[in-house]
Amino acid sequence: MEKVIIIRYAEIHLKGKNRGFFERVFFVNIERALKGLRHELRRISGRYLVEGFDEERVDEVCERISRVFGVHSYSVGYQVPSEMDKMYFAAKTVCPKEGTFKVVTHRASKKYPLTSMEINAAIGGRLLSEYKNLKVDVHDPQSHVYIDVRENGSALVFCAFERGRGGMPVGTAGKGMLLLSGGIDSPVAGYMMAKRGMSVECLHFHSYPYTNDQAKEKVVDLARILSRYSQTVALRTVSVTHIQEEIHEKCAEDLMITLLRRFMYRIAERIAKKAGAECLITGESLGQVASQTIEGITSSNSVVTLPVLRPLIGFDKEEIIERSVDMGAYETSILPFEDCCTVFLPEFPATKPKLSYILQEESKLDVEALVDEALQTTERIVL
Ligand code: ATP
Ligand code: MG
């Protein structure tokens, strides 16, 4: 009797002609998630089967599968020859020993000598006589015992469906450049785009030496956490120190953040295009802070042509935190290291800056030269 994991996918079946492509990417993504663990992955009629893993490490295998986008649900069960005795023994192993239950058989091969109903009755009956505290309830049972009789002479027996994360396989929806700060929001924003199948690359702006190495380490850690879901390969870092000094020296104080954001977007777009990314992704949420008003967003948007995706735009902080905890980033995000945006932070940032005012202040800077200079500081950290 071999322990196996049955994986079912989520929306992939919706994708008509592209189905083959989605399935291939999904397969590769599961393989990648299981890298380093002994296993065999196989496609079987509309599902995937993981076999040949070290049974003592089943929890680790499941944990990794649970992080793959596109997984709708998975079940740990047994693969046995489809003989009644063997299927019964597997059913006995997975079935709870008390409460109400129901056996549900599905036969892929109609050549099997018994019908599904007959298998249900025979195995259910034997379970009842084995465990005196079990009762059958066909309408609303506490547990199910599922028996999938396959065409190749084997059967899969399991009793629970674990929920996957849903979404689409990463790598099926283009590539985005995530502006990753050390905060709570941006890792969640990257997670959410990866969930819709987008490959995510990360870009972080620092103000070394105003911000320190620990702040940078924290962002590397966040990018690593994100990459468990998004397959992010690298984190790019760019220094905006000189840009901030220039804004601080030459421009109106209340526009510090507004002007810095416009520089970040410009630099991000240049890096995105070079890296083959088709959009920018940020963790902005409407109204959360002074710069995240529609006026602030309009001001940053107007310096780029790539689309800017903001998956958190309509989320409350609480909802974002929930997701941050769920993806395992929260503990790292709340470590208290300075972000570049806290350097030269104005006391009263402009919340509804007029574009004419922004342009007037910005004209005091050599924007192109500052962008080029910042790009020279780009570092690429492989995760
Ligand atoms: P976060 O929690 O992601 O830091 P926040 O609520 O602190 O967001 P802001 O600091 O206004 O909000 O940043 C808005 C967005 O701008 C961030 O979600 C991120 O996408 C981007 N951003 C801010 N600071 C940086 C940075 N240092 N490097 C890269 N991107 C940044
Ligand atoms: Mg921030």
Image (spheres, grey):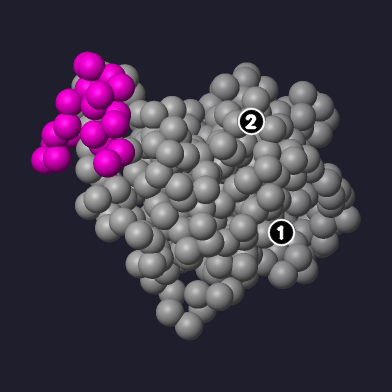
| In the depicted structure, whether residue 305 falls above or below residue 140 | below
* Whether residue 203 can be seen here: no
Near-viewer residue (202 or 130): 130
Q: Position of residue 341 (x, y in %)?
A: 62, 36
Asked if ligand 1 lies within 8 A of label 2, the reply is no
- Judge by depth and name the residue closer to the eye, 353 or 329: 329
**Magenta region includes residue 140:** yes
Q: Which residue is mark 1?
A: 267
Q: Amino acid at mark 1?
A: Ile
Q: Which residue is mark 2?
A: 55
- For marks 1 and 2, give the CA distance: 49 Å
Residue 145: image location, x then y, percent: 32, 38
User: How would you rate the neighbour count of disc 2 (Cα within 10 Å): few for under 14, some for 14-19, many for 20 or more?
Assistant: few
Q: Give the residue type that dot 2 points to.
A: Glu
Instruction: Return the residue nearer the eye: 13 or 111.
Output: 111
Out of 183 and 373, give the one closest to the viewer. Answer: 183
Query: Residue at 53% of width from left, 44% of height from top?
Result: 79
Quarter of the image that includes the N terminus: top right
Marks 1 and 2: which is nearer the front? 2
Q: Earlier in the sequence, mark 1 or mark 2?
A: 2
Rendered view: 293 above or below 159: below
Direction from residue 377 to residue 346 in the image, left or right: left
Q: Tag 2's secondary structure?
A: helix
Q: Which residues are magenta?
A: 122-142
Q: Residue furthest bottom?
A: 17
Q: Position of residue 276 (x, y in %)?
A: 72, 70
Left or right: residue 176 compared with residue 70: right
Which secondary structure lies at badge 1? helix
Left or right of 137 in this view: 26:
right
Is 216 placed left or right of 314 in the picture? right
Q: Is residue 273 above or below residue 134?
A: below
